[in-house]
Image (tube, rainbow, N blue to C red):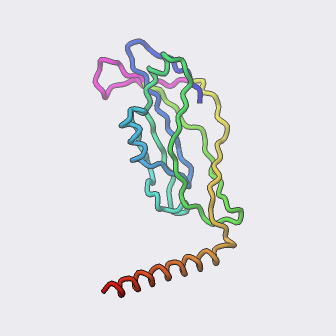
């Protein structure tokens, strides 16, 4: 996205990006927190499901909020590109072997805060940021093919049985 928000003298300008994640996608809050520790972002928050073990059918949608300092970028005169580490949940089986996840454009807010005031006070300004429109982002997530379910389940069961028998045999030989 390319934006060009106005900066006001005596104020810090922060961009707040709110990305509403579609069902089947999640962001790891601990992974995002590392970006704050490395000072890539000012702050991040994840709202909604963060349990990566839930399949997409049992999960709820979530949202990611990112606070980004605009001051250094404005002086450099460059476009802002933000890449988020996102993860796919286990999609349901499909005959095509892929599940399609569509992303919408994120919500953008600019927050102005007086440089010499307390951290809690700020001014929210609603302006058209003239952000370049994004093409629809589509992510094709591989999923299992329904036709292979019997073979994969049988092979998994036999592998687990052979491994557990090997452990029992090894334990009986040791004692």
**Residue appearing at x 66%, y 59% in the figure:** 98
> In front: 174, or 107?
174
> In front: 142, or 168?
168
Name the main secondary structure of what is drawn in magenta: loop
Along the horizontal axis of the image, is 162 left or right of 172? right
> In front: 159, or 134?
159
Number of dots carrying numbers: 0
Place of residue 76 in the rendered image (x, y in percent of width and height, measured from the top left): 50, 17
Place of residue 1 in the rendered image (x, y in percent of width and height, measured from the top left): 59, 30
**Residue appearing at x 65%, y 46% in the figure:** 138
Place of residue 94 in the rendered image (x, y in percent of width and height, measured from the top left): 67, 65
Q: Residue furthest left?
A: 118
In the rendered structure, does residue 127 fall within the stretch colored magenta?
yes
**Residue appearing at x 41%, y 38% in the figure:** 35
- Residue 16 lies, with reference to residue 127, above or below; the image says below
- Residue 171 lies, with reference to residue 10, above or below; the image says below
Snapshot quadrant of residue 152: bottom right
Magenta residues (range): 112-128
**Residue appearing at x 33%, y 25% in the figure:** 121
């Amino acid at each position: 996205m390319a934006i060009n928000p106005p900066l006001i003298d005596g104020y810090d300008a922060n961009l707040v990006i709110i990305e509403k994640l579609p069902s089947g996608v999640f962001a790891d809050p601990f992974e995002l927190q590392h970006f704050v520790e490395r000072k890539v972002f000012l702050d991040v928050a994840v709202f909604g499901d963060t349990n990566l073990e839930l399949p997409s059918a049992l999960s709820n949608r979530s949202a990611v909020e990112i606070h980004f300092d605009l001051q250094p970028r404005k002086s450099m005169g460059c476009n802002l590109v933000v890449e988020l580490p996102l993860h796919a949940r286990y999609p349901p089986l499909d005959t095509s072997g892929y599940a399609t996840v569509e992303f919408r454009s994120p919500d953008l807010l600019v927050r102005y805060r007086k440089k010499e005031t307390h951290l809690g006070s700020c001014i929210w300004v609603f302006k058209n940021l003239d952000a370049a429109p994004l093409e629809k982002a589509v992510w094709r997530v591989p999923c299992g093919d329904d036709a292979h379910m019997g073979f994969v389940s049988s092979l998994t069961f036999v592998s687990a049985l052979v491994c557990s028998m090997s452990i029992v045999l090894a334990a009986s030989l040791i004692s």
